[in-house]
Every structure is written in structure tokens, then in C-alpha cells.
Image (cartoon, coloured by chain):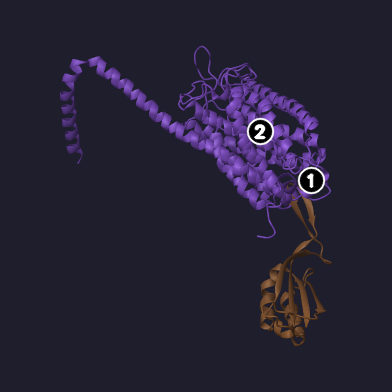
Amino acid sequence: MHKIEAVIQPSKLDAVKDALLEAGIEGMTILEARGHGRQKGHTEFYRGREYTVDLLPKIKIEAVVVDELLDKAIDAILSSARTGKIGDGKIFVTKIDEAIRIRNDERGASAL
Amino acid sequence: MRPRFVKLSFFAFSGFLLCGLPALAQSASGATASQMTQLQTQIANAQTSGDNGWMLVSAALVLMMTGPGLALFYSGLVRKKNVLATMMQSFMMMCIVTLLWGIVGYSLAFGSGTSFIGGFQHLFLRGVGLVPDPAYAGTIPAQTYMIYQLMFAIITPALITGAFAERMKFSAMAVFLTLWSLVVYSPMAHMVWGKGGLLNAAAGGAIPCLDFAGGTVVHITSGVSALVCALYLGKRVGYPKEPTPPHSLVLSVVGACLLWVGWFGFNAGSALNAGTLATSAFVNTQFATATAALGWVAVEWWRTGKPTVLGGISGAVAGLVAITPAAGFVEPMSAFVIGALAGVFCFFMVTTVKSIFGYDDSLDAFGVHGAGGTLGAILTGVFASSAINPIFKDAKTGATLPSGVIEGNWHQLLNQFGGVAIAWGLSIVGTLILLKLVDVTIGLRVTPDEEREGLDITQHGEEGYEFVA
């Protein structure tokens, strides 16, 4: 099992979600997040006062997938979240030791 | 149809004459005299009903300006951790000033006294009943006038809270504004609107200053006192290095729009009746507000590259402030000019001037109310028209005299400056003394740690937005 954490542009959420569902990923968790990588922030003006906002709104998608689906899921995110501009986000993959379904104590891949 | 109608009316009229004649012959003068008196009473009652209806609605509208209007406008502009404390400051003014007004505030403002302050004859509202007080408003109960004026007394100190937002102790705020209401507001209201007041244009004051709805009484006093507060308290922790952006402009837009609507009660209600002058003030209020919002947004778009929502609503409030003293004196086209000037002038006050001097007037109570109020008071002297409001009369002939500079009365400009100077002076001196007093007794500011944590938790033990719900 692997966990995919993808930080994406908020406007791409629907596209990524649909692509993941199509790739057979059935569960995911969405977080509203703020952050930045190499992308610079933007400026805001309030009554003439300039504020530099460097933590930009992002969406973070977390999904734990069985090993066979990992590449398919990554491809789905890459193709649906890419605009080609700085700020498209990143994907992180980690190994997962265990998954447990709270409702009935199921363990492993069947808990996903 | 027409000839028949004439015929019928003729018969009806003859019948009326024939029936009426014997009665008239019997008690000719008696019946008509009593009928006349009855008729006069009925007319007076009808007018009272009409005027009183409008004035009670106006009073409610002006209260709505403070809560929720100002409470929302201001609380949207602060950071999340101070949203409740900011609302509480406006809300508490609705309660504290009401109590104060009934006990002594109204008497000090509208009782007869000296040229500077009223006396104590209306202490605990003694003598303020349902009979009109012709010195103020002859067609509405004195209590309607009293409650209407209370709403002005509420919003004025509430406006000041914008200057010391996010750093003043709740206890200090309550004590300071209670005292301020008696030491600054009541005397100023007395001078401009009270019997025998120094600046009262309607009742022959020594310096007749035109202030229809409170440019000097409400906006200069609150705005200038706000500046004194900002200077005396000092900057917020981290200002201007750390960002302090508004946490919810959504709240501020709702608040500003409620202020706009409520302001019709403030300005048009200041006619003190439901007559034609109320219409003038209503139209001028709308015209000036719209142009001021456009003026602010336009100059901001040009200077910073974006037309902002906060600019739009700030401009609207600046226009409302500037038209306040002029509302019942000027022509609608003058209101356009006053609004446009106010929008541009206040924009430069809250951006350029504030950053040059570096004071932390957190929510721009001075930049909008102090600056806009001063501009409006002066422009009232320029644009006042005797066709809208024949306020000055020749003592002997009763003929209408010119009002403002556009009618050739340059002297009025001097009177306006006199009113402005007195309002500035009283506000500066009164506020300084009271701040000092509260500072040495209970202290004005929260500790830096409390300020970082936010006033909601440290002053009130609550949060505006709970994480778990």
C-alpha cells in the first residue's frame, strides 16, 4: 500500500477527483491548505496598504492505494492537474504499513 | 356623463345650502368657531401622526447603523481573533449610552443652559413627555425627539472604536467612552443643536454653523478623538511590519450597506418631520454616497491598479459622512460634487497621509470620519442654498438671506471654520484629558501577550469562529 499526497491548484480539484475515480481509486481525503513551493505569492491591497501573500490557497488530496493502482493513480493526477505553469503542485508517495477500517476491524488492502 | 354630473352636484349643493341655512342662522359664529378648532386639532393630529411615524422609523434606522451596521463593518476589518471584541464595542455603546442619555446625557445636550452645555432640568428625563417641545420639533412628542437624538449619541462614540481596535482593554473602553459621551458629545450637540447653543444656526447662535445632521457633532468629534486615541495608545504590536489584513470583507460589505440604508434615517430624519426637507436630505444622501464610492474606486484603480471592494465601501462611507452636514441645505447637483471630493480626499487621507505620519488608526476612523466630516462641514458653507432651506432670515423684514458661498454669503465659510475649529478643539482637549485619566487609573491597553492572543479570548473568553461545531 502507498499513500499519495498531492498538492494541487484549487481550481483543479474536480478534474483530479474525477480522474482518480476513473482510475479506480475509491477513497480519498481532501484538505484545504495553504503553502508555497517555488511559486511566488501575490500582493493584496487594503486601503492602499500592500500585503504580500506568499502562502497561497492549495488543495491537498490524500489517497491510500494498493500497489497495483499506484502508477495509474499518479498518471491520473499528472494528466488532470497539469496546467504547465509554476504552481501546479507536487505529488508525494510514501509506503503504508497498515490500514484498518474502524467500522469492522478489517485490515490491509481490503480496508481501503 | 359630464353634464349630468354638474347637474347632480348643483342639486346636492343647493340641498346643502337649504339644510344648512337654519342651523347657521341659529348659532352662526359659535358652530363655525368650534368646528374650526376641531378641524385644526384634527389637522395637527394628522401631521403629528405622519411626522411621528417617520421619526420613529428614522430613530430605528439610526440605531441599525451602529448594530449591526458599524459592528459588522468594523469587525470584518479586524483580524479573526478580535472579531467579537470589535462587535462588542459597538454593541455596548447601544446599551451604555442609552442608560446615560436617560439619566443625564439628554439634559446636558438639549436642556437650556449656557452657550456651551445644557443644564440639569431634564435629569432623569424630567419634563420630557409626549407633548412636543416647540424649541426642537413642534409636531412630534418630545420623547420621540429625545430617542431619535439618543441614536446619534450612540453611534458617535462607537465610531471612535475603529481607531483603537485590536488593542484596548474592554474596561478602559467602556469607562473612556462613557466619560467621552458626557464631556465631548453632549456639549458639542448642545452648541450646534441645543437651545441657546453657541453654533446653533436655527436659533440665532453667535457663530451660526450649518450642520444638518452632525458633520461637526458626530463625525468631527468622533474622527478627531479617534486620531488622538491612535496617537496616545500607540501602534498595535507588530504594526506596520506584520500584516493586519481584514479577516472578512464580506462582513464589512454587509455592514457598510446597512450603514448606507440607515443613513437615510440619520440625514432625512434630521428634517425632524416628514416634509419636503426630508426628501432633499434623502436625495442628497443617495447622490453623494454613490459619487464618493465611485471617486474612491476610480482614484484607487488609477493609483494601485485595482478597483477594490474595500475601496468602494470606504468611499461610500466617506460620502455619507461628508454629506451629513450638508444634506438638508444643498441642491442634488452639489451633493454630486461633495461626494466626489469626499471620495478622493478620504482616499488620500487613509493612504498617503496616514503612511506619511505613521499613526495606527486601525480602521481609519479619523481618515474617513474626521477628514470627511471636516471637508463636509466646510463644503456645506460653500454649497448651502436658501432655496432648499431658508435658514437665515432678516430679523426685521423676515426676508430670506443667502445661505452659502454660491449665493454670495462668504461669511458663512468663516462660520463653518469656526464650528470646525471648536469641534476639533473640544475633541482634542476632552479626549486627551479623559485618556490620561483612564490611563493612570485602570490602564488603556491590554498586555502585548494578550494582544497577540486576541481580545476575543482575553477580554471576553469567547471565539468568533469555533473550530469544532
Which of pointers 2 and 1 indicates the residue nearer the eye?
1
Answer left or right for B411 relative to B305. left
Q: Residue B393's spot in the image, x, y percent?
A: 53, 18
Q: Which amino acid does label 2 sit on?
A: His
Q: Position of residue B210 (x, y in %)?
A: 60, 25
Secondary structure state at the residue bearing disc 2:
helix
Residue placed under numbered mark 2 in the picture:
B219
Tell me the element at label 1. helix
> Left or right of B363: which side holds B137?
left
Q: In which quarter of the image is residue B38?
A: top left
Colour assigned to chain B in the rendering is purple
First-in-chain label (2 vs 1): 2
Q: Quadrant of the C terminus of chain B?
A: bottom right
For the residue marked with disc 1, what is the amino acid? Answer: Glu
Q: Label 1: which residue?
A: B451
- Label 2, residues with CA under 10 Å away: few <14, some 14-19, many ≥20: many
Q: Residue furthest bottom?
A: A68
Chain letter of disc 1?
A: B
Residue at 19%, 37% (x, y): give it.
Answer: B5
Q: In which quarter of the image is the N terminus of chain B?
A: top left
- Shade representing chain A: brown
